[in-house]
C-alpha cells in the first residue's frame, strides 16, 4: 500500500510526495482524520489530490494513504428512497450519527449492510449465465423490483443459488467460471467515472411523457434522449426539474442537486413522499434516488456527485428500466472543475474553464441513450436513460462556455426567459427559441397513440405563434387597430395558446399535470375555435362579436378540468360548433332579409 | 499556552505575508503577527507548502517588516465567543467590542466557518413573516428561514427598507424570541449610524447584535465579518431558540475584498476579475440561513448589495441570485417618481412563497391574487411602452384599463410610508380593489370560487 506525506495544501487541493506506485484516479485517505480524496495528477513521486471534504486543519507531513481503488459506488437494494451526498454517503445516517451539521472524516457505509432483503431466484442451478443476466429479484420498494444481475466481466455456470433473507453482502449464488468458483452477493461496486457497458445503443423511439404541456406537445424529449434547461436565476429551472422528476413516466428518477440550495433538496424530501406517481398511484419516493451536494458542501464532492448519480442511474437501466436523471445544475459542476483546474495551475480555456470542459460535458451526456442491456442473447431487454441538465449561465447569457458546450451535444433545448418569468408566464420556456430534435422521430408515436391529427394541430399552433411574433412587430409600429380582422384573430388565438395552453401552474393541484390526451383536446378546441372564427370573419361578422363568443371563457378554464372528466372537452367542442353556427345562420338570415328588401 | 514564534517572514505583499520554515501549521489556521511596535494583528493561513506558508492579514500589512515582525500560529481557526449577553452590543468586524463596554464573558467559543447544515436535517421554511410592506408581503413574501437579498444600487433607499423590515418584523411576535444580527461590511459611518440610531430609537437595539466594519476599516477584515455575524446568529437560533433576522450590508464590498486577496495571490480570475470560487464562497455564507427540524429557532438572511451600474448581470448580484431564494429588486424609476419603497415587483421574486402563503397562513386567495396582480401589472407595463410609441389615443379600451391599473398599482399598492405597517389582510384587499377595474373574464389566473367570493365583495366596494 502506498503511503506518502502532505507537502502542500491549497483549498481542496492537497499535494503529497512519496506516492510512487499510486495510480491516477485512485482514492486516497488524507491526514489524521482520513479525509477522502482522489488523485488527479501524478508528477514523479508527487500526487495531486482533490479532497472531497473541508481541508481546514490539515498540516504538512501528515500522511496520505492510497486505497488502490477508484472512486466507486455501492450498487445493491436499498438505493431507492435514499439521499446521498456527492460521494454516496447517506445523509440520513450521517445525521443520526453526527447531528444536524455535517462534520468531517465521517466513515459510513453507503447502504445498510445489516438489512435483510428477500431474494427470489429467477435463474436456476446448472444454467449458463453471462454478464448482465438476471439471477433473481428483490422487492426493493412498493413499485420497484430490484433485479440482481451477474456482474460485468463474469460468465460461467451457476453452481448454487438460494432463495431467502439475505444481507446485501451475503452470498446468494455461486458461479463456476473457467478457472474458479466465485461467490456472488447482491452488492456490486462500480467506478463512477467509467460508463457501465451495454450491448447496443438504439435510436430513441418513444417520448418521455412529462405532463408539462409545452414540453410534451411542442418540445418533447425522447426516452433515452438528452435535454438542457438554460436560464438566468429566477426563470424557473429548478421548478421545471422538480416538475419533470415528479411527473415523468420514467420508472426510476435520479435527482442530483449539484451545488444548489439546501432547501430545494429538503423540498424534494418532504414533498415527494406526499405525491402520487400518476402511473402507479404510489408515493413518488418509491422510485426516486436523491444525490445532494449543496453549494456549501465541499466543492470537489460536487464534481463527483454528477458521476455518482449517473452510475446509479445506469445500474437501474441495466435491469431494464426507463430511468431519467435530473442534474441541477451542471454549471455548478463545471465551476467545480474550474476551481480544481485553477488550483492545479492548468492553462485556462474560455472564461477560466479548463480546456477539456467540452469533452467532459459531452462524455457525461453520452451516457444517456436507449439501449439493449448487457445480457446473453435470449435474455436481452431494452431500457433507456434520459438526462435532463439545468444550466445556469452568468447573467442568463447563452454564450457562456458551459451552455455552448452543452448545446453541442443535447438534442432538446428548453430556453427559459427572464421576461416570461417576470410576467409570471410559467414554465418560462420560450416557444420560438426552444427546439427539440426528437420532434420528427416522435411524430409517429403521437399520431398513432393520441390522434392522427396531433402533429398537424401542433404545427398549425406553432405557425400561429410565429405569425404572432411578426404581427406584434407590425402592431408596434402602426397600432393594433389598423391590423386586418384576420390578423387580429391570429393575435387573439396565439394569445389563447400562450395563456390557456402553454402557461401551466405547477402549484395548482390539477393544472400541474396534464395527460397527453388532455393536452391534445385542449389544443384541439383552441384550434377549432380559431377555424370557426376565421369562417365568421370571412362572412364579415363584426370582429367584436367573434371575439366575444361565450365559449372562450370555457376554453380559458379548460385546464382545470380533471383527468377523469374528459367528456367536458367534448361538451366544449360541441359548444364551439353551436356558437359558431348560431352566428353563421343569424348572419345568413340577415343577409336573406336584406336581399328581400332589395 | 505558549506557541512557537517565527521570525522568518520572507515577503510582504498587499494583504499577504509569506512565512518560511514553518512546522505543524494547519490549513486555515489563525495566527498573530507581532509588529516591532508591539502591535498585534491577526491573520489566517491561506496556503501551506513544505517550506512556505501564506498568511492573509486581516488588519492590513502596513508596518509589518521582514526582519523583526514575529508570527505565532494559534492552532485553531478564528473563533467567536458567544453568550446571550451578545445582544444589545456593538462589535467591530472581527468581533471585538466597539461600544466601550467590556468584552462579553463567553459561554462557549465557536469556529466562525461553521459547518454545512445537513440537507436531511433541514426543515422547509413555511412560516410567513409579516413585514407590513405590501410589495413584499403581497407579492414576494418573506418566509422564516429564507435567504432573500435586496438588490439595490447607489442612491436608493435600501438601508431604509432593510431597517423598516427589521423594525416591523420584530414587532409581530412579542411573545416569541426575536433577534436581529447586523453585519456591516465597508459601509459608511453615516449608513451604520442610521441603523444604530433607528434601532435605538425604536428600542430594537436590545435585541440586536451589530458587527461593524466601516468603509475605512481594514478591507480584509470584512472577509470575516459575515461569518462572525452568522456564527452569532446560529448560536442564537439553534441553541437559544430565537428567530434571527440577519442583515448583511454590503455584499458587493465584501466581494471586492475577496477579489483583492485573490489578485494578490495571482489566481486566474473569473468574470470581471472576481475569483472562480466566488460562487462557492458566497454559498458558504448564504446557505447558513435556514431552519432545522425539531428546533424552534430560525435564521432569515437578508443580504443587501449594490449592483454596480444597476447591472443585474454583474457577478455579485448574479451569483447571489443563483444561491438565494429569490431577490427583492429596487428600481431607480420608481424612486424618481417618489414612490417609497421603490420595489420593482416584477423582477423581484420569493421562491419559498408557495409554502408560506394560503389558507391558515395568510389567506386562501393569496396565491391566485398575486399571480393575477403580477400578470396585470406586467401587461400594464407593456401597454405603457406601447403608449409611448403610439400615443394613448390608439390603445384599445382594454389596454387603457391596463394602463390605468399599472399607475394605480404603483400609487396605491406599492407606495406606502416608512412607518406604515399594513396587515396582510389590508394588503390583499387593496389588491382586490385594484383588480375591480377589470371585468371578471379578464382575471384568468384566479379560481372561479375566489372570484365569486372576493370580486363581488371586495373589489366592488
Image (tube, coloured by chain):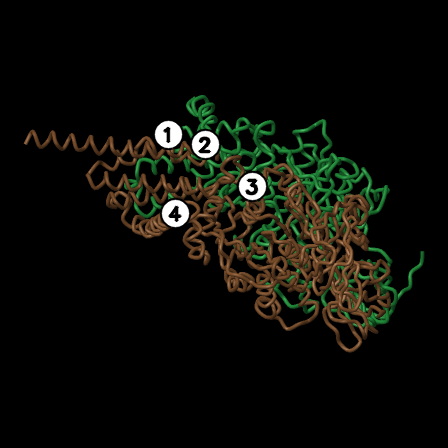
Chain colours: A brown, B green
- Left/right placement of residue B26 relative to residue B129 reads right
Residue B252 spot, x, y in % from top left: 62, 54
Report the label total: 4
Do callouts 4 and 2 mark residues in contact (Cβ within 8 Å)? Answer: no
The subunit carrying tag 1 is B
Residue A454: assigned label: 4
Image point 8% across, 32% down: which residue?
Answer: A595
Per the model, the C-alpha gap separating discs 3 and 4 is 22 Å
Per the model, the C-alpha gap separating discs 4 and 2 is 21 Å
The subunit carrying tag 4 is A
Residue B159 spot, x, y in % from top left: 60, 43
Which element type, helix, strand or loop, lies under badge 2? helix
Callout 2 crowding tier (Cα within 10 Å): few <14, some 14–19, many ≥20: few
Residue position marked by numbered label 2 in the rendering:
A565
Per the model, the C-alpha gap separating discs 2 and 3 is 18 Å
Callout 4 crowding tier (Cα within 10 Å): few <14, some 14–19, many ≥20: many
Residue position marked by numbered label 3 in the rendering:
A279
Residue A167 spot, x, y in % from top left: 80, 49
The subunit carrying tag 2 is A
In the rendered image, the vertical position of residue A162 relative to residue A67, given as above or below: above
Amino acid at each position: 500500500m502506498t503511503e506518502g506525506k502532505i507537502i502542500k495544501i491549497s483549498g481542496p487541493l492537497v499535494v503529497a510526495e512519496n506516492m510512487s506506485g499510486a495510480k491516477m484516479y485512485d482514492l486516497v485517505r488524507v491526514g489524521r482524520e482520513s479525509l477522502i480524496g482522489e488523485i488527479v495528477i501524478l508528477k514523479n513521486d508527487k500526487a495531486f489530490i482533490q479532497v472531497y471534504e473541508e481541508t481546514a486543519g490539515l498540516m504538512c507531513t501528515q500522511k496520505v494513504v492510497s486505497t488502490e481503488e477508484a472512486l466507486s459506488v455501492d450498487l445493491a437494494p436499498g438505493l431507492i428512497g435514499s439521499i446521498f451526498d456527492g460521494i454516496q454517503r447517506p445523509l440520513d445516517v450521517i445525521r443520526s450519527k453526527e447531528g444536524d451539521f455535517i462534520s468531517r472524516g465521517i466513515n459510513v457505509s453507503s447502504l445498510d449492510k445489516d438489512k435483510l432483503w428477500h431474494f427470489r431466484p429467477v435463474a436456476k442451478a446448472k444454467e449458463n449465465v453471462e454478464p448482465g443476466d438476471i439471477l433473481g429479484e428483490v422487492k426493493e420498494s412498493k413499485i420497484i423490483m430490484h433485479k440482481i444481475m451477474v456482474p460485468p466481466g463474469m460468465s460461467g455456470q451457476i453452481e448454487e443459488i438460494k432463495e431467502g433473507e439475505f444481507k446485501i453482502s451475503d452470498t446468494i449464488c455461486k458461479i463456476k467460471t473457467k478457472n474458479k468458483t466465485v461467490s456472488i452477493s447482491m452488492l456490486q461496486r462500480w467506478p463512477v467515472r467509467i460508463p457501465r457497458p451495454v450491448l447496443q445503443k438504439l435510436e430513441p423511439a418513444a417520448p418521455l411523457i412529462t405532463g408539462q404541456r409545452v414540453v410534451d406537445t411542442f418540445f418533447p424529449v425522447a426516452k433515452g434522449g438528452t435535454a438542457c434547461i438554460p436560464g438566468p436565476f429566477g426563470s424557473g429551472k429548478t421548478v421545471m426539474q422538480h416538475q419533470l422528476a415528479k411527473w415523468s413516466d420514467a420508472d426510476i428518477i435520479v435527482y442530483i442537486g449539484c451545488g444548489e440550495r439546501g432547501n430545494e433538496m429538503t423540498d424534494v424530501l418532504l414533498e415527494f413522499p406526499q405525491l402520487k406517481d400518476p402511473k402507479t398511484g404510489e408515493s413518488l419516493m418509491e422510485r426516486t434516488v436523491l444525490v445532494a451536494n449543496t453549494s456549501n458542501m465541499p466543492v470537489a464532492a460536487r464534481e463527483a456527485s454528477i458521476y455518482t448519480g449517473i452510475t446509479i442511474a445506469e445500474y437501474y437501466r441495466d435491469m431494464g428500466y426507463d430511468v431519467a436523471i435530473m442534474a441541477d445544475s451542471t454549471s455548478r459542476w463545471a465551476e467545480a472543475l474550474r476551481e480544481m483546474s485553477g488550483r492545479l495551475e492548468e492553462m485556462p480555456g474560455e472564461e477560466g474553464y479548463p480546456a477539456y470542459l467540452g469533452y467532459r460535458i459531452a462524455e457525461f451526456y453520452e451516457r444517456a441513450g436507449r439501449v439493449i442491456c448487457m445480457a446473453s442473447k435470449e435474455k436481452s431487454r431494452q431500457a433507456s436513460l434520459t438526462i435532463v441538465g439545468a444550466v445556469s449561465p452568468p447573467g442568463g447569457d447563452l454564450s457562456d462556455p458551459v451552455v455552448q458546450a452543452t448545446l453541442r451535444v443535447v438534442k432538446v433545448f428548453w430556453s427559459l426567459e427572464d421576461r416570461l418569468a417576470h410576467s409570471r408566464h410559467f414554465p418560462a420556456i420560450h416557444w420560438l427559441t426552444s427546439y427539440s430534435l426528437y420532434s420528427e422521430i416522435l411524430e409517429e408515436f403521437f399520431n398513432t397513440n393520441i390522434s392522427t391529427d396531433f402533429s398537424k394541430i401542433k404545427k398549425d399552433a406553432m405557425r400561429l405563434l410565429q405569425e404572432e411574433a411578426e404581427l406584434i412587430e407590425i402592431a408596434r409600429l402602426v397600432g393594433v387597430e389598423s391590423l386586418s380582422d384576420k390578423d387580429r384573430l391570429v393575435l387573439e388565438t396565439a394569445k389563447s395558446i400562450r395563456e390557456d395552453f402553454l402557461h401551466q401552474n405547477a402549484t395548482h393541484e390539477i393544472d400541474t399535470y396534464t395527460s397527453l390526451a388532455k393536452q391534445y383536446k385542449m389544443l384541439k378546441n383552441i384550434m377549432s375555435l380559431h377555424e370557426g372564427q376565421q369562417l365568421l370573419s370571412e362572412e364579415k361578422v363584426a370582429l367584436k362579436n367573434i371575439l366575444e363568443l361565450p365559449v372562450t371563457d370555457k376554453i380559458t378554464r379548460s385546464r382545470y378540468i380533471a383527468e377523469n372528466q374528459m367528456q367536458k372537452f367534448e361538451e366544449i367542442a360541441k359548444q364551439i360548433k353551436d356558437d359558431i353556427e348560431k352566428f353563421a345562420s343569424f348572419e345568413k338570415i340577415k343577409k336573406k332579409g336584406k336581399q328581400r328588401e332589395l | 499556552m505558549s506557541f512557537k514564534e517565527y521570525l522568518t517572514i520572507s515577503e510582504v505583499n498587499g494583504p499577504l505575508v509569506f512565512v518560511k520554515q514553518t512546522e505543524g501549521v494547519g490549513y486555515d489556521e489563525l495566527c498573530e503577527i507581532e509588529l516591532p511596535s508591539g502591535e498585534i494583528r491577526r491573520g489566517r493561513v491561506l496556503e501551506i507548502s513544505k517550506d512556505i506558508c501564506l498568511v492573509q492579514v486581516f488588519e492590513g500589512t502596513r508596518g509589518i517588516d521582514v526582519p523583526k515582525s514575529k508570527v505565532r500560529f494559534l492552532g485553531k481557526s478564528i473563533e467567536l465567543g458567544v453568550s446571550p449577553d451578545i445582544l444589545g452590543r456593538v462589535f467591530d468586524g472581527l468581533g471585538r467590542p466597539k461600544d466601550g463596554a467590556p468584552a462579553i464573558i463567553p459561554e462557549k467559543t465557536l469556529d466562525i466557518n461553521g459547518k454545512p447544515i445537513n440537507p436531511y436535517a433541514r426543515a422547509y421554511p413555511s412560516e410567513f413573516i409579516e413585514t407590513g410592506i405590501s410589495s413584499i408581503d403581497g407579492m414576494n413574501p418573506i418566509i422564516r428561514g429564507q435567504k432573500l437579498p435586496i438588490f439595490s444600487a447607489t442612491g436608493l433607499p435600501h438601508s431604509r427598507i432593510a431597517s423598516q423590515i427589521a423594525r416591523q418584523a420584530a414587532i409581530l411576535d412579542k411573545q416569541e424570541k426575536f433577534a436581529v444580527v447586523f453585519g456591516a461590511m465597508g459601509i459608511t459611518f453615516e449608513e451604520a449610524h442610521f441603523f444604530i440610531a433607528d434601532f435605538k430609537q425604536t428600542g430594537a437595539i436590545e435585541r440586536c447584535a451589530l458587527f461593524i466594519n466601516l468603509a475605512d476599516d481594514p478591507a480584509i477584515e470584512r472577509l470575516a465579518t459575515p461569518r462572525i455575524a452568522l456564527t452569532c446568529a446560529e448560536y442564537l437560533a439553534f441553541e437559544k431558540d430565537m428567530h434571527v433576522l440577519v442583515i448583511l450590508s454590503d455584499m458587493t464590498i465584501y466581494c471586492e475584498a475577496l477579489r483583492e486577496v485573490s489578485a494578490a495571490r495571482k489566481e486566474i480570475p473569473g468574470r470581471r476579475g472576481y475569483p472562480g470560487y466566488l460562487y462557492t464562497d458566497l454559498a458558504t455564507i448564504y446557505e447558513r440561513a435556514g431552519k432545522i427540524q425539531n428546533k424552534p429557532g430560525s435564521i432569515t438572511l437578508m443580504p443587501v448589495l449594490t449592483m454596480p451600474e444597476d447591472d443585474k448581470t454583474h457577478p455579485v448580484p448574479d451569483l447571489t441570485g443563483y444561491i438565494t431564494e429569490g431577490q427583492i429588486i429596487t428600481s431607480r424609476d420608481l424612486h424618481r417618481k417618489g414612490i417609497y419603497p421603490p420595489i420593482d415587483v416584477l423582477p423581484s421574486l420569493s421562491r419559498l412563497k408557495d409554502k408560506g402563503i394560503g389558507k391558515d397562513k395568510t389567506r386562501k386567495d393569496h396565491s391566485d391574487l398575486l399571480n393575477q396582480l403580477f400578470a396585470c401589472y406586467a401587461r400594464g407595463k407593456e401597454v405603457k411602452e406601447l403608449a409611448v410609441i403610439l400615443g394613448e389615443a390608439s390603445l384599445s379600451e382594454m389596454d387603457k384599463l391596463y394602463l390605468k391599473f399599472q399607475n394605480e398599482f404603483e400609487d396605491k399598492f406599492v407606495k406606502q410610508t416608512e412607518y406604515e405597517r399594513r396587515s396582510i389582510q389590508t394588503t390583499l384587499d387593496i389588491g382586490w380593489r385594484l383588480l375591480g377595474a377589470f371585468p371578471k373574464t379578464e382575471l384568468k389566473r384566479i379560481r372561479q370560487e375566489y372570484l365569486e367570493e372576493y370580486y363581488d365583495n371586495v373589489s366592488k366596494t
